[in-house]
Amino acid sequence: MNEARTPETSGVSARSAGPTTPLDLLRATGYVIFDRLLPETTVDQLCAELDPWFEATPRCQGDFYGWNTTRFGSVLLKSHATHALVLHPLILGLLEAILGPHCDWYQLNLTQAVRLHPGERHQVPHRDEEMWPCPKNGCEFLVNVMWALSEFTAENGATLLWPRSSFTRLSRELDLAEATVAVMPRGSALVYLGSLTHCAGANRSDRPRTGLILSYCLGWLKQYENAFLAYPPALARQFAPALRDLLGYRIHRPNLGGYEGQDPAVLFETTSHTLPAIDAIADSSVEELHRFYARTGGPARSCR
């Protein structure tokens, strides 16, 4: 694929088959790759912070996670350099377009570092949206970003993608030869939809393949990684407010995910269990309530 520069990438190269924007490509094929989005110094810092955790973490157990793969979560506590990646403006712009229309706000679904060791077989083809077993009705539930912390090659297990599979029925009986191999240099970012069929490739090389998955989903869904256990208030307090919002320390209208009827961010100020519950509803709902009470003769009041 040829490289094309587009306004949406702010000068960053995205692979495109023509004068197509990264957002258009993501919607049309289900994925887009940004080559060398991170400078080498940032990748070096990420690896230096994460490598001790890879060494200390036992390998996975299970046919899906892989028997020759290392994975771990709570990445924001283990690598400060990951904070900037979570809030990368290019990625957030894509999320706003894909997820933004379907929720009050989107959230982090998962932070996971992954290392495929030599000899690991390829994963079963799957879609990450399968964790929510309900009709999606054409709505995207999540967007994933795979950051390449090492070279991704056909030999070392680069992600396999079936372009445009998000428009077809899910099948496990797919031809690996028809998959696109997400070959990309160190520091690149693969962005793909939760509705896209994909899998980790087989590592037939003599070196591990290392990536960092940052996954985002609609704010009203249950997250894959329980953020309140991974990052409880006492720890999340040290994070930037924008990062805390993405972890779910923000009420989702209408009145979803609160603490004692308030925005859960109140936990950074108090742990009281005697707080007044405060409406957190959409402006349209506020006006609807006002019209209702105006019609029925009841008092119309507002918290705003």
Image (cartoon, grey):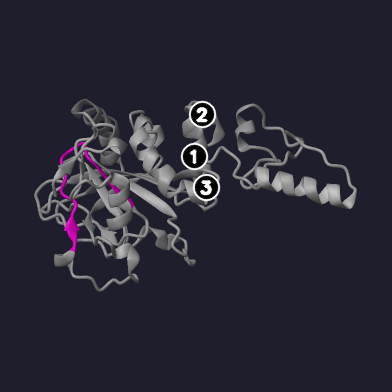
Q: Which residue is mark 2?
A: 241
| Amino acid at the residue labelled 3 | Gly
Specify start and end residues of the magenta stretch as a single range.
179-192
Pinpoint residue 49: horizontal percent, then vertical percent. Answer: 29, 30
Query: In what quadrant of the picture does the C terminus appear?
Result: top right
Residue 161 is situated, as x and y percent measured from the top left of the image, at 23, 58
Please state if 262 lies on the left or on the right of 52 as rendered.
right
Q: Judging from the image, what secondary structure is the residue with disc 3 in?
A: loop
Q: Which mark, residue 221?
A: none
Q: Earlier in the sequence, mark 3 or mark 1?
A: 3
Q: Secondary structure at mark 2?
A: helix
Q: Nearer the viewer, residue 232 or 1?
A: 1
Is residue 79 visible to the viewer in this orientation of the structure? no
In the picture of the structure, the residue carrying the numbered disc 1 is: 247
Residue lying at 64% horizontally and 26% vertically, measured from the top left: 269
- Categorize mark 2 by other alpha carbons within 10 Å: few (<14), some (14-19), many (20+): some
Q: Residue furthest bottom?
A: 173
The residue at the point 29 percent across, 32 percent down is: 10
Give the Cα distance between marks 3 and 1. Answer: 10 Å
Residue 65 appears in which quarter of the rendering?
A: bottom left
Q: What residue type is disc 2 on?
A: Pro
Label 3 neighbourhood size at 10 Å, few (<14), some (14-19), many (20+)?
many
Q: Residues within 10 Å of mark 1 (few under 14, many from 20)?
A: many
